[in-house]
Amino acid sequence: MMELIYAAFSPSNLLLSVLLVLIMFYWLTVILGALDVNSIDVDLDMDVDVDVDIDVDVDVDVDVDVDVDADADVDADAEGSVGGAGWFMLSLRFFNFGRLPFMVVMSLLVLFMWSISVYCNHEGSIVNPNNSLLFAGLLFVPNMFVSLFITKILTAPLVPVFAKLNTSVENVKTEGKVGILTTSVNEKGMGQMKAEIDGSVVSLSIRMQDKEPIKKGEKVVIIEYLADEKIYIVDKIDHH
């Protein structure tokens, strides 16, 4: 046990060990009820123009808010190809990011990366017996790719389960539901919101009815759901 602890917190494994401890703390707060499994969520949505919206949102009840928002718009050309950002998002979806709750995929990815790193980088290992920090750095990218494929294989059975759950949310009557924007609305009127639907707080991709600019944190009301675009049309709450 002491050898494992020593190896885990050696310089070559320290970064992944710290990430693993943070993830364990996150799941502990989920178990205790302070957070839910979707408290940290990445939503990858591609509409007809291949719009990619990423929303990483952390909400804690003690008035601590951490939000990282990124929007990338990628236009498909006549042959249907997409830019680098589009392929990057497609790659993320290939590894089940956006198909499953972000922290489920990320937790498994970090766990596998940590396990491989500790196995390779410790005294007596056949890979890096000298525990060289430089060699450990060179192993990081191959480790990540191997762990991504292991994560994809092990999470594949969960994808249809969560897809069915998402479909059940779409089938619930949402018109008139009020929620809060978790991103600022871009020039196309696109953004993200969170709302309580059928007893669960869910993250939804939205488009403003009049496409006017609106800041994160504003309250909006759902007007209708466009099933073909998988997007919710909303309006500012003070319009009603």
Image: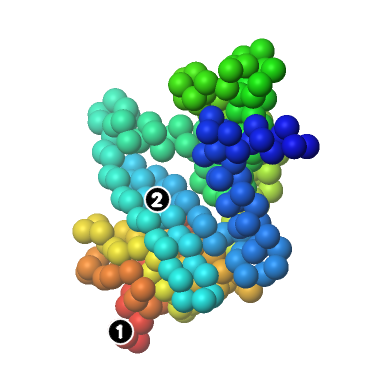
Residue 234 visible somewhere in the drawing: no
Mark 2 or 1: the one toward you: 2
Disc on res. 135: none
Up the image or down, 226 lies above or below 240; here it is: above
Q: Residue at x 38, y 69 (%)?
A: 181
Of all residues shown, which one is farthest toward the top? 126
The residue indicated by pointer 2 is 54
Residue 48, image quadrant: top left
Which quadrant is home to the C terminus?
Answer: bottom left
The residue indicated by pointer 1 is 239
Residue 123, image quadrant: top right
Q: Position of residue 4 (x, y in %)?
A: 71, 34
From the viewer's side, name the closer residue of 153 and 178: 153
Q: Position of residue 59 (x, y in %)?
A: 49, 67
Q: Residue at x 34, y 76 (%)?
A: 218
Q: Residue at x 73, y 32 (%)?
A: 3
Up the image or down, 125 lies above or below 180; here it is: above
Q: Position of residue 172 (x, y in %)?
A: 59, 68
Which of pointers 2 and 1 lies earlier in the amino acid sequence? Answer: 2
